[in-house]
Image: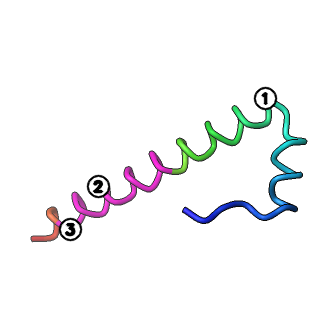
Amino acid sequence: MSRPTKAEKLVQDRVSKEEMDAMKRARENNKETKYFHKEFHKQIARLGK
């Protein structure tokens, strides 16, 4: 992974713990949603066969 720039580091320093937790939950939720859609489309494709 690339190292954060100075500006990114300043922003990261200003982000509170609550905001970090919220962003982490959002990323995890996004991963779960993508996985669900992938599996859903696989099942739909199987039904069409």
Question: How far from the left and from the top, in percent, is residue 23?
Answer: 69, 42
49 displayed left or right of 8: left
Q: Residue at x 78, y 64 (%)?
A: 5
Q: Amino acid at mark 3?
A: Ala
Q: Residue at x 39, y 57 (%)?
A: 37
Overall secondary structure of the magenta section:
helix
Could you give the CA–CA distance between mark 2 and mark 1, rounded to whole angstroms?
Answer: 33 Å
Residues 34 and 25: in front is 25
Q: Marks 2 and 1: which is nearer the front? A: 1
Pointer 2 residue = 39
Q: Amino acid at mark 2?
A: Glu
Does dot 2 land on a helix, a strand or a loop? helix
Quarter of the image where one finds residue 21: top right
Residue 39: say if magenta. Answer: yes
Q: Which mark is residue 7?
A: none
**Magenta part of the protein: which range?**
31-45
